Structures are given as C-alpha cells and as structure tokens.
Image (tube, helix red, strand yellow):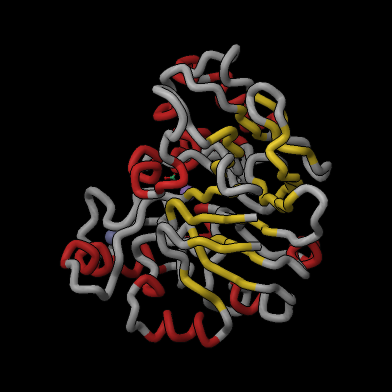
C-alpha cells in the first residue's frame, strides 16, 4: 500500500492568504527554513494506479498537478482517483469536491453526519450522483473501498469516531459546549490493503487522545496524526486568532495532555504529524520544537511525502 501526503497544512495552508505571522513570512521568504504546504489531504493506493483521496482540500487541483501518480493517464478524460473518503465536513476537507466536477466518476465515502452536510448544500449537486455515488461509511465496521462502478480498489477502511467538533460553519452555540457536535462529525480511518494485516491510520483532526484511541492506533505501521498546534494557546499568543486548540477541536502537541505525551507509550511503526497550522513552530526546520518532536520519534509531514506500508 502506498500513502502519499498531498497536503500537510491545516485549513488556510502555508502561507495563508491573509497571514503575516512569523512562519507564513518565512514560507514566503523561501530561504529553506519553512516549506510552503497545501491544505490537509492524503492519497492511498493498493497498486500505485488507482488512488483514493482522504479528504478533498481546496488545494486539490494544485495537489493533483504536483503529484504525477494522480495525473490523467488513459484517453482524453481519465483520473486515477476512484474514491474520496471524508473525515469531517470542514472546509479544508470538502471544498475540493467542487474541483472534482467535470463528469468524472468516483465514489464519495463519509459518515451519515457528513453526508447530511453535503446533502443540505445544493452546490455539491454539481457532482451528479449517477456518476458520483455517495456511500455511507459506517462507524467501526470495515468496508471494502470501491470505485463508482463497484470495482474493489484493494483497500479496506474502518472508520472510528474521535473526539472532535462539528464543522466551524455549523457550530450552534444554543446547543451547549459541544456546539451540536455528534459522533461521526469527526472520524479517524484505519486502512489496510485487502488481505494484509498492516494498518495505516489517518487522524487529521482529533480533540483528545483517550484510552480507546490508544488501543486503536497501537501496532499501526503508520499513523498520520493531527499536528495542528504545538501550544494550545499559540494563536492567541501570536495574535493570529482568538481560539485555543481545544476550542477548535484539536489536541495540541505539547503539554501534559498533548499528543506527544499521550501517544508516547503506543507502539507505532512510523508516527507523523500532519494538518499542521501555519502558527506551529515545528514547521521551522531549525526550531527547538521541531527538534523536540523528532527526538520523540515523530516526523513532520511535507507535501509529496510518500510512505510504503
Ligand atoms: C479545522 O481544522 O479546525 C478547520 O479546518 C477550521 C476551518 O474550517 O477553517
Ligand atoms: Mn482543518
Ligand atoms: Zn501564518
């Protein structure tokens, strides 16, 4: 199984269009200390020919152009992308579906909660459902991912609910501290090649690591995990936002309840931070924070990075 990071940044990307924070400025400077990154997405394939995108980022068009395995290869209209699996309904994970119009068959997999968000927004009708079927991804039960015509793609996916938050634009303050969040609004994925035991877990959004998640990730060959913020309050401290990571539904890396500590005792083949916000100092190649996560055995994802599982 091949796993390719299409976009390793959180929503907004790096640099973000309206951000002049230290890290966005370094990315624009192009001096090698910070590499530009596109918004959160990965692609997975059992054969290197047929690919499944995990989330459809607003940068999908650029990501396809930047990743030759995703280029059309046969005839005048073709795409190696046979399915898209969504882990939530955030803008950075669904807006790229609009790039995938043009009457190209592929299948969309998402939970009932996320499918309901797509159904409620008529702009997604640009994807004709006779060509682009929408399929429910059940929680817990492993399913064989298939293309639009039902052909198995050689990949099994199991969705599991993780702590998180309903999409920002659907937050309802009248519904209490969770803003109306329900199970299935944010999921992680465990993916393996059909007939093989090795697991790749994809968890680009996660608010907390609990015992259940620790059990679930344990033994995975590869985990790409939510690396949005290093410090829970780094957006406040840097003057780029008013919210903590906790308020945004993202566990931070550092601190006593951070992911570095929470996952430290979990046996994982490779552990990689992705969905990294442009305020996160691990993005700076020569920062102490980058050195700290690497010393703890983590990699910092970059666009175009490929893994074999
Ligand atoms: C997030 O990960 O918190 C979201 O992508 C935020 C957003 O939708 O801008
Ligand atoms: Mn996001
Ligand atoms: Zn910035």
State left or right for residue 31 relative to residue 54. Answer: left
Q: What quarter of the picture does the C terminus occupy?
A: bottom right
Which quadrant of the view contains residue 96?
A: top left
Residue visible at 40% across and 58% down?
Answer: 303
Nearer to me, 219 or 210: 219
Estimate the x, y position of residue 80 in percent, counting from the top left: 51, 36
State left or right for residue 18 relative to residue 10. Answer: left
Which quadrant of the view contains residue 77?
A: top left
Kindly give the residue lying farthest to the front in the view shown. Answer: 75
Estimate the x, y position of residue 181 in percent, counting from the top left: 64, 40
Q: Is residue 226 visible?
A: yes
| 120 is higher (above) or lower (below) than 275 | above
Nearer to me, 251 or 61: 61
Nearer to me, 27 or 198: 198
Q: Is residue 171 visible?
A: no
Which quadrant of the view contains residue 65?
A: top left
Question: How many numbered markers are drawn?
Answer: 0
| 297 is higher (above) or lower (below) than 38 | below
Residue visible at 46% across and 62% down?
Answer: 305
Kindly give the residue lying farthest to the left in the view shown. Answer: 29
Q: What quarter of the picture does the N terminus occupy?
A: bottom right
State left or right for residue 164 relative to residue 233. Answer: right
Nearer to me, 308 or 213: 308
Estimate the x, y position of residue 232 in percent, counting from the top left: 48, 68
Estimate the x, y position of residue 147 in percent, counting from the top left: 65, 29
Residue visible at 62% across and 50% down?
Answer: 164
């Amino acid at each position: 199984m091949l796993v390719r990071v299409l976009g390793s940044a959180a929503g907004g990307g790096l640099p973000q269009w309206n951000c002049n924070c230290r890290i966005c400025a370094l990315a624009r400077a192009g001096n090698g200390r910070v590499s530009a990154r596109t918004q959160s997405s990965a692609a997975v394939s059992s054969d290197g020919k047929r690919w499944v995108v995990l989330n459809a980022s607003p940068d999908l068009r650029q990501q396809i152009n930047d990743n030759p395995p995703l280029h059309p290869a046969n005839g005048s209209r073709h795409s190696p992308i046979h399915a898209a699996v969504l882990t939530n309904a955030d803008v950075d994970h669904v807006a790229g579906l609009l790039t995938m119009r043009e009457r190209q068959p592929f299948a969309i997999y998402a939970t009932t909660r996320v499918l309901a968000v797509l159904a409620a927004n008529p702009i997604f009708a640009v994807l004709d459902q006779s060509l682009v079927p929408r399929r429910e991804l059940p929680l817990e039960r492993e399913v064989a991912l298939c293309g639009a015509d039902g052909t198995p793609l050689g990949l099994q996916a199991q969705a599991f609910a993780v702590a998180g938050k309903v999409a920002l634009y659907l937050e309802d303050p009248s519904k209490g501290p969770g803003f109306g969040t329900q199970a299935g609004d944010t999921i992680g994925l465990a993916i393996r090649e059909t007939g093989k035991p090795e697991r790749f877990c994809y968890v680009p959004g996660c608010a907390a690591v609990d015992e259940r998640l620790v059990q679930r990730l344990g033994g995975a060959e590869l985990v790409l995990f939510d690396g949005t913020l290093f410090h829970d309050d780094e957006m406040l401290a840097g003057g780029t936002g008013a919210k903590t990571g906790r308020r945004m539904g993202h566990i931070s890396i550092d601190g006593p309840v951070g992911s570095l500590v929470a996952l430290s005792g979990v046996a994982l083949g490779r552990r990689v931070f992705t969905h990294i916000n442009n305020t996160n100092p691990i993005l700076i190649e020569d920062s102490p924070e980058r050195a700290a996560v690497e010393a703890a055995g983590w990699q910092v994802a970059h666009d175009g990075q490929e893994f074999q599982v």
